[in-house]
Amino acid sequence: MPKLWNETIEEHRRAVRDAVLEVTATLVAEHGLRGVTMSRIAEGTGIGRATLYKYFPDVESIMSAWHERQIAGHLQELAALRDRPGSAGERLTAVLDAYALIQQRRHGHDPEISAVLHRGDHVDHAERHLLRFVGELLAEGVEAGEVRDDVSPDELAGYCLHALAAAGGLKSRAAVRRLVRVTVDGLRPERGPVRQIKSQGRRGI
């Protein structure tokens, strides 16, 4: 089969898969997990039910795939902040700020939906990746003298992520910023504070 034809087929499959994920997420948000069927998803996507089953076996597997894609997008967002110009302290603060906002946005999921979303191995993999990701950035901060060196970066990474998970219960952006500020304050060395972001609309925290 010609390469161009293969690429066209793959693009079509990706488009169908993406459409299925979006339609399912919208339906579940509107009707709850138990109120959505594969037939309803197929109808909303504009494909036959038999075609849908070639992609996913059930609604839960679709939601798991949707969640995996969401997590990948969040990790890309955080990586872009880590890799932008600036000191280690500035980039660390930007990453923690964005992570806290992600935690706030995900608040409010139905308990049944949350149980399904966090069941897959992709969640554990993402958490390990994020701990390593933040730990490496903290190590940069230690080397630059912007982060305390009396606690290991790996331990500090766990502290940061657990602390900022509390953003899920906060109602306002201002409250999230206060939580980030408290967390960042705990990272400061005895002398020389963690630098704070002052660009792209993110004021110092």
Image: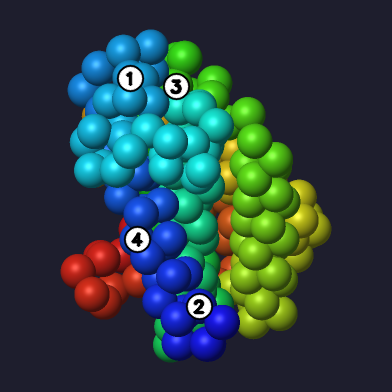
Circle nearer the N terminus (4, 1): 4
> Foreground mark, 3 or 2?
2
Indicate the quadrant containing the C terminus: top left, top right, bottom left or bottom right.
Answer: bottom left
Q: Residue 113: which numbered mark, if any?
A: 3
Circle nearer the N terminus (2, 4): 2
Circle nearer the N terminus (3, 2): 2
> Foreground mark, 1 or 3?
1
SS of the residue under disc 4: helix
Is 90 situated above or below 157? below
Circle nearer the N terminus (1, 3): 1
Where is residue 161? Give x, y as percent: 58, 45
Looking at numbered disc 3 in the image, what kind of residue is underneath it? Ile
Spatial distance from mark 3 to mark 2, Cα to Cα? 36 Å
Q: Residue at x 51, y 43 (%)?
A: 54
Spatial distance from mark 3 to mark 4, Cα to Cα? 24 Å
Image quadrant assignment for residue 187: bottom right
Give the residue at mark 2.
Answer: 6
Give the residue at mark 4.
Answer: 15
Q: Residues within 10 Å of mark 2 (few under 14, many from 20)?
A: few
Give the residue at mark 1.
Answer: 36
SS of the residue under disc 1: loop
SS of the residue under disc 3: helix
Q: Is residue 100 left or right of residue 202?
A: right
> Foreground mark, 2 or 4?
2
Circle nearer the N terminus (3, 4): 4
- Residues 97 and 121: in front is 121
SS of the residue under disc 2: helix
Where is residue 99? Give x, y as percent: 45, 52
Looking at numbered disc 4 in the image, what kind of residue is underneath it? Ala
> Decide: marks 2, 4 in contact (CB < 8 A)?
no
